[in-house]
Image (cartoon, helix red, strand yellow):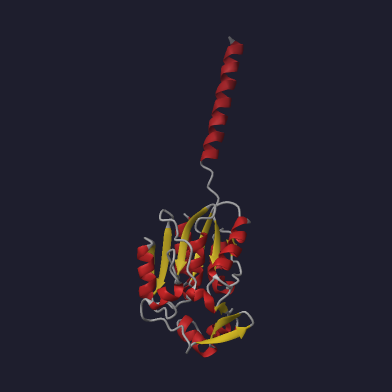
Amino acid sequence: MKIRRLTAAVATVLLTVTGATTAAATHQPKPKPTIVLVHGAFADGGSWSEVTKKLQRDGYTVVTPAVPLRSIATDTSYLNGVLAGISGPKVLVGHSYGGALITQLAGAADVKSLVYVAAFIPQAGETIGALNAQYPGSEIGPDTTNAITYPGGVDLVMKPDAFRWVFAADLPSRQAAVLASSQRPVSASVFAEEVEASAPAGLPKYAVIPGKDRAIPPAAERFMAERAHAKIVDAPGASHLVMLSEPSLVTRTIEQAAH
């Protein structure tokens, strides 16, 4: 009898321990997705600096690749290579022209959601130039850009004295001047290039729309966001560089998408 009682007691302990272990494993928190921040034209990864700091503080792994800014097809191919080296779930965040790129990348493995920040959300067959001209309000044009001609192509760069007005009216003038001096030219051809794909309809999407954007008209951003059934987050007083002027708002939106 004593042996049977001992055996039963041991079995009870083992079942209890196993159950506790199973329960603990079941309730292990899921790993946070990697946040991939894709910058736009006339910019580099530094435009995400404030958001990156906040996301890293909150425990997220952040990747901010340098986009070649050569063509939508070329940039998408390059970024697909970047994504292939990131394991686990990913949230893609695109600013401005970067929105067209994350739209093309949306079908990559483990992409869980898309966040558009003052960004284009094109559909297959559209061009970002046509989308930007669909509503009045964009100040990007011959009066605010300089052309850089080289063998094989033409790049565009914002004129230094126009950069703050178009992109960063709500940032201090000194900060805007630094950004203007470090901007990266974009191939002029990207504005007339047709995108190949629309983002999957069932993929969660978020869109931050700055009300004082002079690069992409806010009305165009809202049209594209509503058409894509994105959750809209308004930033009424913000400029095109809303992720620098209102980084907390943008970070909260990204983390909502990550959840």
Name the one closer to the observer, 127 or 114.
Answer: 127
Task: Identify the image quadrant of the N terminus.
Answer: top right
The residue lying at 54 percent from left, 34 percent from top is: 22
Q: Is residue 31 above or below residue 188?
A: above
Q: Which residue lies most toward the front here?
A: 152
The residue lying at 35 percent from left, 74 percent from top is: 219
The residue lying at 55 percent from left, 26 percent from top is: 15
Q: Is residue 140 above or below residue 244?
A: below
Q: Is residue 155 left or right of residue 199?
A: right
Q: Position of residue 83 (x, y in %)?
A: 59, 58
Name the one closer to the observer, 123 or 248.
Answer: 123
The residue lying at 55 percent from left, 39 percent from top is: 25
Name the one closer to the observer, 151 or 133.
Answer: 151
Does residue 237 show up? Answer: no
Name the one closer to the observer, 176 or 99.
Answer: 99
Q: Is residue 64 left or right of residue 168?
A: right
In terms of image quadrants, where is residue 38?
bottom right
Q: Position of residue 175 (x, y in %)?
A: 54, 83
In terms of image quadrants, where is residue 236?
bottom left
Q: Position of residue 33 (x, y in %)?
A: 54, 55
Q: Is residue 256 above or below residue 9?
A: below
Q: Which residue lies most toward the top here?
A: 1
Does residue 231 show up? Answer: yes
User: How many discs mark residues in the rendered view?
Assistant: 0
Q: Position of residue 95 (x, y in %)?
A: 49, 70
